[in-house]
Image: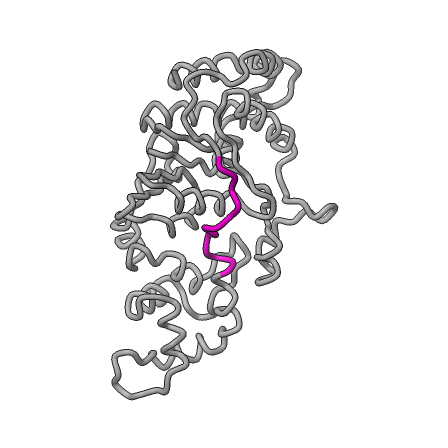
Amino acid sequence: MLMLLDTPSLYFRAFYGVPESVTAPDGMPVNAVRGLIDMIATLVRDHSPTRLAACMDADWRPAFRVAAIPSYKAHRVATDDGAETVPDALTPQVPVIEQVLDAVGIARVGVPGYEADDVIGTLTARASGAVDIVTGDRDLFQLVDDAKPCRALYTVRGIRNLQVVDEAFVGQKYGIPGRAYADFATLRGDPSDGLPGVAGIGDKTAAALITRFGSLAALLAALDAPTTAGAADTLPRGARGKLAAARDYLEVAPVVVRVAQDVPVPELDLTRPAKPRDPERLVALSQRYGLDSPLNRLLAVLS
């Protein structure tokens, strides 16, 4: 089984879940580093993946998404340099996380111009067997596929109480076909990502429309078709006006909402490491940042 880690989602969760009082010997906060290491140890212990990849944001706000919808994540842009707004205490921990992953030997995958979600989508598409995606981001629910099988392990309740998201979960939670999450999310929008959605269409109406028509493409085809009173494929009058007003948005939104599955991810060995790739480097990192306990736990479950 291949386990794909939405690493930014996990280290943000670790940062807010572990007190900043957890520090290195020199006083630098390492709460996100220690928290992430413990998360990975728990995931490996509980789910025993044979392959493992830590997927990264090489670009947290890709140009192709901003070109389609300029408001995409615009509220998270730092005013001084255009970078993502990140807590000051987290910023210096991200390079440490990367160094630790590399020294342990867990494949760390990021591709310029793409988000971690896109790397996850591509590796999922390439995988020939079962895939577990560990994330706190509902956007990745669009990848669940019972036939593959691919499921999301959703961290909303914590890493030890993961919600297993499959097509049945998506259908029950949102009232839509299990593979239709991306189209549903396009209609309703997502303020946390700066996606406006269709004005006047909330969760219930979005779910009803996607369930009735099956996909956003079919919905737009119905919008363009001549109206025929009483026809099963005719849009409700109220929805028709709202969708027509949002037509420009609906034409470009799928580029933003849908996870890319054709990213040029290099061929990598994703085999779960049984021993550290660089033991000397790992010892140095452990001593520098006070990581003996969490690294010992991780190495124990990996071996």
Q: Quadrant of residue 231?
A: bottom left
* Span highlighted in magenta in the image: 255-267
Colour mapping: one colour
- Residue 11 x, y percent position in the rendering: 51, 33
Looking at the picture, does residue 41 appear above or below residue 261? above
Quarter of the N terminus within the rendering: top left
Q: Which residue is drawn at 43% across and 62% down?
A: 188
Q: In this view, does 40 lie to the left or right of 27?
A: left
Q: Residue at x 65, y 29 (%)?
A: 92
Counting every numbered tag in the picture gives: 0
Q: In the rendered structure, does residue 260 fall within the stretch colored magenta?
A: yes
Front residue of 137/260: it is 260
- Residue 85 x, y percent position in the rendering: 63, 43
Looking at the picture, does residue 121 appear above or below residue 221? above
- Residue 184 x, y percent position in the rendering: 38, 61
Quarter of the C terminus within the rendering: top left
Q: Quadrant of residue 3?
A: top left
Q: Which residue is drawn at 38% across and 76% down?
A: 221
Q: In the rendered structure, does residue 238 fall within the stretch colored magenta?
A: no
Outermost residue on the front side: it is: 267
- Residue 141 x, y percent position in the rendering: 37, 49
- Magenta residues: mostly which secondary structure? loop
Q: Residue at x 32, y 26 (%)?
A: 48
